Image: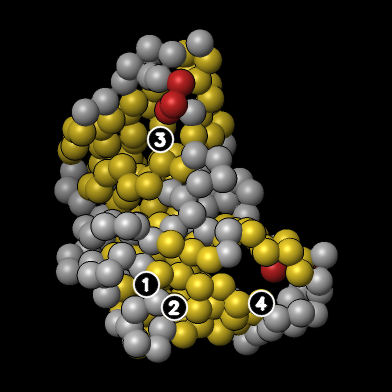
Amino acid sequence: DTGVSQDPRHKITKRGQNVTFRCDPISEHNRLYWYRQTLGQGPEFLTYFQNEAQLEKSRLLSDRFSAERPKGSFSTLEIQRTEQGDSAMYLCASSLGETESSPLHFGNGTRLTVT
Amino acid sequence: GQNIDQPTEMTATEGAIVQINCTYQTSGFNGLFWYQQHAGEAPTFLSYNVLDGLEEKGRFSSFLSRSKGYSYLLLKELQMKDSASYLCAVKDSNYQLIWGAGTKLIIKP
């Protein structure tokens, strides 16, 4: 179990540019989540996958955000035309999802700074 | 609306005991989680409660009262490494996790 890994750890981009983040979940985990977190706040749900199917997407999520999990393994999160308000820590988490008590296992996140 | 309330910050002394409270108002309830998050790091799972009562895990215990919409995390024999944020999260009727803003715990020697 190597844990959830995310790449890159840090990303600085200029407003208007597109960025893509990658998440590799724990290998046997079928559920994968994306969250966004800003300083002093809890994680904010963005979207989640069960295997390759995207089952839910936050209503608050702009259409500039898109996520994929093409083979039910790794996932990517793309933000198009970035804005300064997108600056945050983007967290990926995975879980077995077999029971409702299954905890989320988080990666160390990608910190995005939009200048 | 759905709401999770936790104190913003607490301070305690090394070796002491501290209780971090969490109150919630959610549409349905399917369990409550506590996570620990050190600055700049990922949240890590501490405990899960779905039935009323106390769950003990070493130095950490978590309590739940569903009728009161209330939980607490109890940390005993505090160590400096326990300085972190502690996040309370509730699974609602749609099995979505609703997160509190976290309680920053500062441990002083």
Label 2: chain letter: A
Give coordinates of residue B52: x percent, y percent.
Answer: 18, 43
Local secondary structure at mark 1: strand
SS class, disc 2: strand
Q: Is residue B67 above or below residue B8?
A: below
> Vertical placement of A80 versus B23: above or below?
below
Residue at mark 3: chain = B
Disc 1 marks a residue whose amino acid type is Leu
Asked if A24 appears above or below A105 in the picture, the reply is: below
Mark 1 vs mark 3: in front: 1
Q: Are marks 1 and 4 on the same chain?
A: yes
Q: Nearer the viewer, residue A96 or A41?
A: A96
Marks 2 and 3 sit apart, C-alpha to C-alpha, by 35 Å
Which residue has dot 3 on it? B21
Residue at horizontal 56 percent and vertical 45 percent from the top: B40
The residue that appears at 33% across and 47% down in the rendered structure is B45
Label 2 belongs to which residue? A75
